Amino acid sequence: MPMYEFECPSCGVLRTELCRMGENGEFLTCVECGQAGMMKQISGFASFGVSGGTKGGSCLPGCRGNCTGCH
């Protein structure tokens, strides 16, 4: 299950939740003010464990850990 960020429409508190895909936050309650119905936010993607390539070689110049040639 993916993690999503939700924002309270009343007080602006952000909350990260492990949810089913497509969860829109309507059943979540704010932990600060108690407002029901959090708003799903667009957040960045994170990837862990890539450093220096996994095929035994070094990354090519300019690679930022996301190329298919060395990973």
Image: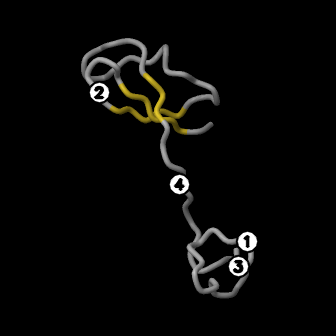
**Circle 1 sits in a helix, a strand or a loop, which is it?**
loop
The C terminus: image quadrant: bottom right
Q: Residue at x 42, y 14 (%)?
A: 37
**Residue plotted at (74% across, 77% down):** 69
Q: Residue 25's spot in the image, x, y percent?
A: 49, 21
For marks 3 and 2 on the same chain, the one whose residue lies earlier in the sequence = 2
| Callout 3 amino acid | Cys
Q: Earlier in the sequence, mark 1 or mark 4?
A: 4
Q: In this rendering, is residue 28 above or below 44?
A: above
Inspect the image, locate mark 1, and give the three-letter code of the amino acid beneath it. Answer: Thr
Tag 4 residue = 46
Residues at marks 1 and 4, CA–CA distance in whole angstroms: 17 Å
Residue position for label 1? 68
Residue 45 percent location from the top left of the image = 54, 51
Q: Secondary structure at mark 3?
A: loop
Q: Quadrant of residue 31?
A: top left
Using a 10 Å C-alpha cutoff, classify the residue at mark 3 as few (fewer than 14 neighbours), some (14 to 19) or many (20 or more): some
Residue 9: image location, x then y, percent: 34, 20
State the mark number for residue 70: 3
Q: Identify the residue position indicated by label 2 in the image.
A: 12
- C-alpha gap between disc 1 and disc 2: 39 Å
Closest to the camera, between mark 2 and mark 4, is 2
Amino acid under disc 4: Ala
User: Distance from label 3 to label 2 (Cα)?
Assistant: 42 Å
